Amino acid sequence: MNGDYPSDADSDDARVGNVNEELVCPQEFLPTFQAIEGPILTKANQVEYNSKPDSLFFDDGVRSIDFILVYEDEEKVSERKDTIVRRKARREYFEASLMKMGLELEATSSVLNDNLIFVKVHVPWEVQCIYAEVLHIKVPIEVNTTPPRPSVWNCFHCVTKYFKPDEDLIKKETDYFTAPFQKNRRDCFYIGDKNHFFTPSMKSRMAYYILCRAPYELNERVKKFGITKLLSGGVYKAAYPLHDCRFNVKSREESCPNERFLLFKEWAHPKNFYKIQPLDLIRRYYGEKIGIYFAWLGFYTFMLALAAVVGLSCFIYGYRTQETNTWSKEVCDPEIGGKIVMCPQCDLCHYWMLNSTCDTSKTLTIFDNFGSLVFAVFMSIWVTVFLEFWKRYQAELEYEWDTVEFLEQGEPPRPEYEAKCIYDRINPVTGVKEMVPYTACGRCFRLSIGIGTVLFWIMLILVSIVAIIVYRLAVFLSLSIKLKDAGDLKNLEPIKEYVTPQMATSVTAGIISFVVIMILNTLYERVAIWITDYELPRTRTDYENSLTLKMFLFQFVNYYSSCFYIAFVKGKIVGYPGKSVYLLGKYRNEECDPGGCLIELTTQLAIIMGGKAIWNNIQEVLLPWVKNLISRYFNRSTLEKGELPRWEQDFHLQPNLKLGLFYEYLEMVIQFGFVTLFVASFPLAPVLALINNLCEIRIDAWKITTQFRRIVPEKAQDIGAWQPILQGIAILAVATNAMIIAFTSDMIPRLVYYWSFSLHEGYSDHTMKGFINSSLSYFNTSDFSGTALNPPIERLRNVTICRYRDFRFPPGHPREYEYNMHYWHVIAAKMAFIIVVEHIVYLTKFILNYVIPDVPYTIKERIKREKYLTQVILHETNLKLVTKRLRPVIDGFSSHIEAKNDNEIEMSQY
C-alpha cells in the first residue's frame, strides 16, 4: 500500500486481491446510511425456491427484488481454508452492513448448482426516500395538462405510423411536472402507490449506489467497502439487476410490465430495422445513459441517409463519366499511353508503359471527378447541420427525460475517489472543509504520468507507421521486378490485369496496417484504463471524460495515421529520376501512380472501415452468442422445463463490461471520422456507414436485450466529452478534404490545364486533350548515375527518354530538371483553392451555428413554464400543509379567545 494511505493490518490480503486496489477510507469519512458499531451477527434469511420462475419478488410476494448478489457456498468450495474463511467473513460483514443500512436481504439456493447462493436485495420505502434525495431523482408532482404543441409530422401521420413502434403495445407515458425528490416534503409529490412510485430502474440505481458504499471489513483505522472489490476478489460471483421477463415470452405474473419482451419485439428484432426506436421505453428500462446513446446513434443514422444519397449520386456520376473521361482515354490509348515509356519507380525496377495502368486510371475517374469536390463541400456543411440539429434534439430529450439540471445538482463522487480521501482542503465554492485524495502537487504528478504515457504510446504508433512505410518500399521494389515478368502471373490469370505493384503493395500494407491497429488498440485500452484509474477522477462523468480523451487521441493516431500518410506524404517528396530522395539512406521514397495516390487512399479507407466493422461485429455478436449457446447446451434439460427462476436465468447471461457503452461510442466516433475526414476520396463512405449503422442499432439492441444481463441504470444529460470531439472532427474535416482535393487528387492540375495551358498546346478551345502529355516530364536515361537498370523487354533496350510525373524543364534546357512555370501555376491554384474553400465553408458553418439555436425556442418556453408551475404547485402545497398543521392551533386559540370574551361578558354583567 502507498505510504500516503492507511496500512492494512491483514498481511494475507494479497491472496484475495491486490492490496493497492482495496477501497479504504478513514472511518469517519465512510458515506453510510447508519453507523455500524460492534460485532455484526445479522444474516440474510434463507428460503427455498417457491417454483415461480417469473417472480420478481421475495418469497412473500410483496417485496420487490431490486438487485441480485451471487456467491459460492464457502462450505462446498475446495480452496485454501484461510482464503475461504476470509471470503466468508467479508461477505457476512458486507451483507450485515447492507441490512444495517436499511436494505432487506433474502437468500435462495441455485436450482442447477448447489454451490451457488442467490441473495435478493430489496430497497424499502424509507430507504428509497433517502437515496432518491441523495441522487437528485426527479419525480412527479402533478399531471401536466398543458396541450402539446402541434408538430409538422402530424400532417403525415398516415405515413409515419408505419415507421413507429406499435402504439397499442408501447403506451405513451403520462406527462408530469417533476421536481427533485425531498424526503421531508414527500407530501408535495404525486405518490399514489408507494410500490410503483419509483420505477424498477430507479430502485436498482439506488441499490447499486448503496452496494458501492457498504463496508465489508473493519480494522482499527479504516473501513474497506464496495461491491466492485468483492467481485474482483471472488467473494461474489456476480451482481446485477433483474430483467423483468424472458425476451421472447411474456411473464406469467400479472403485475409484470414485460418491458424486455416489448423491447425485443418492437426494437431488437431485425424486422424492425426501418422503425423509429422506442426511446422512452429504452430510457425507462435501461436508464438515461443508454437512452441518450441510442438516440444519438439513431439521429446520426438518419442524417447519414441524406449524406449517403448524395454520395451515391456522386459515385454514379463518376461511374457514368468513366468511359468518356478524356485523360483516362489517353492513358489507355495504344497510340498515346502505349507509346509513353515511364521511368522506373525504384532503383531495381524496370521501365514500364503508361497504358499498363489503364484499369487503375479508369477506376480512379470514378472517385476523382468534379462530383467529389461538390460532395466534399456538401459534407463539410452536412456535419455542421448534423451537430447543430443534434444539440437541438438533445435539448428536447433533456426536457422530456428530466435531465436539464442533472449536472447543476451535483453528481456523487465515485467510491474509488472517496476511498482515497485523506487530505483536508477548503472548497473554493462553498468555503467548507472537505476531504481530497491528493494535494495540488500530487495531482500534477498524476497528470504528468498520464500525459507522458499517452505521448509514449502515440510515438509507438508513429514508429509502427515508419515500419509499414519501409515494408511498402521493400515490397514495392520486389513486386516491381517480379510482376512485370508475364511468367510469374500464370497462377493469377483471372485477376492478372488488375495486379500491379502499386495495387498489391497498397492492399497488403492496408491489411498489415489494420492488424497492427487492432493489436495496439487492445494493448492501449488496458494502459488507458490504468492511467485514468491512477488519476482518480472525482465523479463518474469526470472519469469517462478523461478516459474518452485519452482513448480518442490514441485511436485518432492509430486509425487515421496511415490515411494521412497516403493522402499528404506519399509521393510528395520523391525528387526526380537520377536524384531521388531516400528514407534512412537506403529506401527510395514511394511514388504515386500516374493517376495519383487517391485510389490508394480509397483502398486504405475501404480496408480499414470494412475490417473494423467485421471485427467489431464478431466481438459484439458472435462471442456472446456462442458463450450463451454453450451455457444453454449444458443446462438444456432444466431450461427446457422452464424451471429456472428469473434471477438464475439472468445469471447464465453474459456479464456487462464496465465500459461497454464507451466502446460503442468510440466505434461510432471513429466511423464518423472516416466519413467526414476523408470523404473527398471515397464518396461511398456514408453509404457503407449507413448500412453498418442500420445493422449496428439492431445488433446492439439484440445484444443488450437477449445476450447480456440487465445494465445498471445510469443518469446522463448528454453524450459527454464526445460532443467537443465531434465538433473538433467537423472543423478538421474542412481542412483535410480541401487538402485531399488540392494535393492528393489531380483535379486542380486538370483545371489549371483546361483553363490556362490547353490553348498553349495548339488547341483552338479549352480541352482536356493533351493533359497526360503535359503532366509528365522528360528525363534522359543517360543521366542515371550508380544504378543498374536491366529492362527485361527487348524493345526497351534502346530507351533514351523516359517520362515521370512532375512539372519540370526537359533535359537540354538551361534550367533542366527544375520546376517550370506550369508547376508554380498549379501550386498557386492549389493554395488559392484551399484558402477560398476553407473560408467559404467556415463562414457557412459559422452562419449555420449562429442561425440554428442549440435549444429550440418552444423547449425554452416549456422549461420556464414548468419551473414556474412547479414553484406554484410546491408553494400551494406548502401553504396547505402549513394551514393543515396550524389549524388545530388556530382553532384552539380561537376557542380560547371566545371563551375569554364570554367570561369577560359574564363578569361585566355580574
Image (cartoon, rainbow, N blue to C red):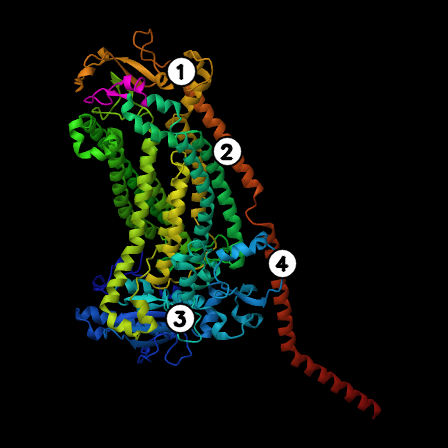
Query: Which marked residue is nearer to the observer: mark 2 or mark 1?
Result: 1
Question: Residue lying farthest bottom?
Answer: 910
Secondary element at image label 1 = helix
User: Hey, what amino acid is under mark 4?
Assistant: Arg
* Residue 338 sits inside the magenta stretch: yes
User: Hey, what amino acid is under mark 2?
Assistant: Val
Give the CA separation, mark 4 to mark 1: 66 Å
The secondary structure that dominates the magenta segment is loop
Q: Residues within 10 Å of mark 4 (few under 14, many from 20)?
A: some
**Residue contact between numbered discs 2 and 3, judged by CB atoms under 8 Å:** no
Residue 592 visible somewhere in the drawing: no
Relative side of 863 to 165, left or right: right
Give the CA separation, mark 4 to mark 3: 40 Å
Q: Which residues are magenta?
A: 332-353
Marked residue nearer the N-terminal end (4 or 3): 3
Relative side of 230 to 137, left or right: left
Between residue 769 and residue 45, name the one nearer to us. Answer: 769
Image coordinates for residue 363, horizontal then vertical, percent:
34, 31
Secondary element at image label 2 = helix
- Residue designated by label 3: 250
- Residue designated by label 4: 865
Q: Residues within 10 Å of mark 3 (few under 14, many from 20)?
A: some
Q: Which residue is drawn at the image coordinates 36% and 59% (left, top)?
A: 702
Give the CA separation, mark 2 to mark 1: 28 Å
**Residue contact between numbered discs 4 and 3, judged by CB atoms under 8 Å:** no
- Residue designated by label 2: 841
Image coordinates for residue 193, horizontal then vertical, percent:
51, 75
Q: Which mark is residue 822?
A: 1
Give the CA separation, mark 4 to mark 2: 38 Å
